[in-house]
């Protein structure tokens, strides 16, 4: 059963890569067989020319989030220090101020971490899309050179 789920997932990912494939129309009455042959030749040529295989690019998982780790801990430490100072000055209870500050700092650090990871994910997705677009531009040029209209 696992194998069928894996196969289905791979088909969906491959379908995603090829969902962006441009529509190709024969401009000079090429037969479906000729169009299929030209399509395969341009696929191979674009893959060799760019070094990009859109199916592989689409199947590549996004990179694991990188960047600052421990942002919650750092936020908690900053919050505790600020809370201790404010609590000590305001009501003479630095311990309570530190606890409140640590909690607020941990929450702020978590928010900061999620924002950083979201930016990294969007950047990775944009890079992946740009890579696939490069491939399809070369493929388009090949098909147009073989007298097809590409949209």
Image (cartoon, rainbow, N blue to C red):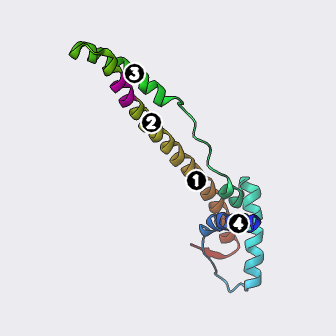
Give the magenta part as a residue range: 99-105
The quarter in which the N terminus is drawn is bottom right
Residue that mark 1 sits on? 130
Residue that mark 2 sits on? 110
Q: Are the residues tagged 4 and 3 within 8 Å (C-beta)?
A: no
| Front in this rendered view, residue 148 or 63 | 63
Is 112 situated left or right of 144 in this image?
A: left
Residue drawn where x is 63% and y is 62% of the image: 136
Residue drawn where x is 47% and y is 36% of the image: 113
Distance from disc 4 to disc 3, alpha carbons, whole Å, reads 47 Å
**Earlier-in-chain disc, 4 versus 2:** 4
| Front in this rendered view, residue 56 or 70 | 70
Residue that mark 3 sits on? 78
Residue drawn where x is 46% and y is 24% of the image: 74
Task: Classify mark 4: residues with Cα within 10 Å, few (<14), some (14-19) or many (20+).
Answer: few
Residue 102 lies within the magenta run: yes
Distance from disc 1 to disc 4, alpha carbons, whole Å, reads 29 Å
Distance from disc 4 to disc 2, alpha carbons, whole Å, reads 34 Å
Q: Are the residues tagged 1 and 3 within 8 Å (C-beta)?
A: no
Q: Position of residue 122 (x, y in %)?
A: 51, 48
Say if 47 sits above or below 67 in the image: below
Q: Where is residue 20 in the image (x, y as percent from the top left)?
A: 59, 67
Residue that mark 4 sits on? 5
Distance from disc 2 to disc 3, alpha carbons, whole Å, reads 13 Å
Camera-nearest label, 1 or 4: 4
Q: Is mark 1 on a helix, strand or loop?
A: helix
Residue 11 occupies quadrant: bottom right
Overall secondary structure of the magenta stretch?
helix
């Amino acid at each position: 059963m696992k194998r069928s789920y894996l196969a289905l997932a791979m088909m969906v990912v491959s379908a995603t890569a090829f969902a962006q494939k441009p529509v190709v129309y024969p401009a000079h009455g090429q037969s479906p067989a000729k169009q299929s042959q030209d399509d395969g030749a341009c696929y191979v040529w674009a893959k060799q020319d760019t070094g990009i295989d859109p199916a592989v690019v689409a199947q590549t998982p996004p990179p694991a989030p990188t960047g600052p780790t421990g942002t919650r801990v750092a936020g908690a430490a900053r919050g505790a220090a600020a809370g201790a100072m404010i609590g000590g000055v305001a009501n003479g209870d630095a311990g309570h101020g530190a606890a409140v500050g640590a909690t607020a700092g941990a929450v702020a650090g978590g928010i900061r971490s999620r924002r950083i990871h979201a930016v990294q994910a969007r950047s990775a997705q944009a890079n992946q899309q740009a890579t696939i677009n490069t491939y399809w531009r070369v493929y388009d040029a090949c098909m147009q050179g073989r007298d097809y209209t590409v949209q």
